[in-house]
Image (cartoon, grey):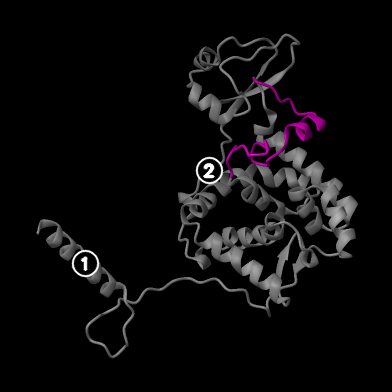
C-alpha cells in the first residue's frame, strides 16, 4: 500500500512538472508564460567581417554558419566569456605592444583567448601557457623549460615566440588567415592539405574540427570582446582587471634555495611572487651556471 501511494504521488508530481513546461496555444488561459528576451547572434551576409585585415567571406553560407556558431558559443559561454572580458584589459596591455613591435596584426591578440582563455594551462599534448607552446618549439626559440623554470609561462617571452612563429608562417603562406591556421595545426600539415585539396584559401579547406573552427572562433571572440554590450555583457571598464604593471625588477644570478624566504626579503608573499612570475615552477631556483634571471617584485 505504501509503495502504491509513493508511486501515485511521484506520478502526480511528474505530470505537474510536465504541464509546467508544455507549450500551449496562445488562447489557452490555463498557462501564462513570462516573455524573455534572448540575444541570438546572427551573421549578416551584407556586412563585412574582418580578421587581420583580411575579409571573411560570409556570403558563403558555410562560412556564415560556421561564424554564427562561434558567435552563439562565445555569447553563451557565460562565465568564461565574462572572465575573458574582465581579463582582456590586463593581458592585452602586455600582448598588444609586442604584436605591434613584430608587425603582427592586432587581431592576433584574440588568439591568446582562443588558445587558453588567458590561463597558463597544459593541453593533453603537452602544450603549455597562454600561447600553448610545445616544449620542443619553446626550446627551439631559446626558451628555458625544465623542472624549475618554464618560460612558456612568461607572458612577454612566450608572446615573442608566438610572434616569430606567426611571421614565419606569414612568409610561407602569404596570408595572415593561413598563418593563424598553421599556428593551430602546424605548417607542414596545412601545406599538405592545401596541395591535396587544390585550395588557396583557408575558407575553402576541409580540415579537422578544431582547425575548421579556429579562425571563425578568433573572429567571434574579436567581435564579442570589442562590443560586449552588443552580445548582452554589461561590464564597465572599472569592473575589468587592470594590468599588473606596478612592480620592480630584481636581477638574480645565484641559486635561490627557498623562494618563500626570497619573497619575504621584499615584503611580499610567495603567492604574489608566483602571480607575477608564473614561470618559476618550484620552491627553489638552482643556478649553477650563474644565469641572469629577472624577477618581478610587486610593489
In this rendering, is residue 143 above or below 173?
above
Tell me, yes or no, whether the highlighted magenta stretch contains residue 139.
yes
Please name the residue shown 18% across and 62% down the image.
Answer: 7
Q: Is residue 80 left or right of residue 50?
A: left
Please name the residue shown 54% across and 46% down the image.
Answer: 87
The residue nearer to you, when weighing 61 against 105, is 61
The residue nearer to you, when weighing 284 against 235, is 284
Q: Is residue 226 left or right of residue 169?
A: left
Q: Residues within 10 Å of mark 2 (few under 14, many from 20)?
A: some
Query: In terms of secondary structure, where does tag 1 sit?
Result: helix
Q: Which sits earlier in the primary sequence, circle 1 or circle 2?
A: 1
* Location of mark 1 (residue): 11
Please name the residue shown 61% across and 23% down the image.
Answer: 280
Residue 169's label in the rendered image is none
x and y percentages locating residue 292 in the rendered image? 73, 17
The overriding secondary structure of the stretch rendered in magenta is loop
* Location of mark 2 (residue): 242
Q: Is residue 271 left or right of residue 53?
A: left
In this rendering, is residue 263 above or below 124?
above
Residue 70 in view here: yes
Name which quarter of the figure residue 1 lies in: bottom left
Tell me, yes or no, whether the highlighted magenta stretch contains residue 115.
no
Report the span colored magenta.
118-147
In the image, farthest residue toward the bottom: 27
Name which quarter of the figure residue 282 lies in: top right
Q: Is residue 243 left or right of residue 146?
A: left
Q: Nearer the viewer, mark 1 or mark 2?
A: 1
Amino acid at each position: 500500500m505504501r509503495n502504491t501511494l509513493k508511486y501515485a504521488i511521484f506520478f502526480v508530481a511528474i505530470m505537474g512538472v510536465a504541464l509546467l513546461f508544455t507549450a500551449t496555444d496562445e488562447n489557452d488561459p490555463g498557462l501564462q508564460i513570462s516573455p524573455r528576451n534572448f540575444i541570438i547572434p546572427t551573421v549578416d551576409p551584407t556586412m563585412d567581417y574582418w580578421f587581420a585585415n583580411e575579409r571573411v567571406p560570409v556570403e558563403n553560407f558555410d562560412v556564415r554558419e560556421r561564424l554564427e556558431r562561434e558567435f552563439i558559443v562565445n555569447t553563451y559561454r557565460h562565465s568564461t566569456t565574462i572572465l575573458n572580458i574582465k581579463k582582456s584589459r590586463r593581458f592585452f596591455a602586455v600582448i598588444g605592444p609586442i604584436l605591434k613591435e613584430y608587425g603582427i596584426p592586432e587581431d592576433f591578440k584574440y588568439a591568446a583567448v582562443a588558445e587558453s582563455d588567458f590561463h597558463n594551462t597544459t593541453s593533453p599534448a603537452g602544450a603549455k601557457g597562454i600561447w600553448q607552446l610545445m616544449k620542443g618549439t619553446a626550446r627551439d626559440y631559446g626558451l628555458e623549460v625544465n623542472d624549475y623554470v618554464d618560460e612558456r609561462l612568461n607572458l612577454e617571452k612566450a608572446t615573442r615566440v608566438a610572434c616569430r612563429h606567426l611571421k614565419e608562417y606569414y612568409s610561407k603562406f602569404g596570408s595572415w588567415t593561413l598563418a593563424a591556421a598553421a599556428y593551430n595545426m602546424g605548417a607542414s600539415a596545412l601545406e599538405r592539405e592545401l596541395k591535396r585539396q587544390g585550395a588557396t584559401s583557408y575558407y575553402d579547406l576541409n580540415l579537422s574540427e578544431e582547425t575548421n573552427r579556429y579562425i571563425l572562433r578568433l573572429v567571434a571572440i574579436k567581435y564579442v570582446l570589442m562590443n560586449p554590450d552588443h552580445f548582452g555583457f554589461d561590464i564597465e571598464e572599472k569592473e575589468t582587471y587592470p594590468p599588473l604593471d606596478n612592480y620592480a625588477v630584481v636581477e638574480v644570478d645565484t641559486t635561490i634555495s627557498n623562494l618563500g624566504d626570497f619573497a619575504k626579503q621584499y615584503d611580499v608573499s610567495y603567492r604574489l611572487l608566483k602571480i607575477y612570475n608564473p614561470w618559476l615552477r618550484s620552491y627553489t631556483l638552482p643556478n649553477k651556471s650563474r644565469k641572469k634571471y629577472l624577477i618581478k617584485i610587486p610593489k
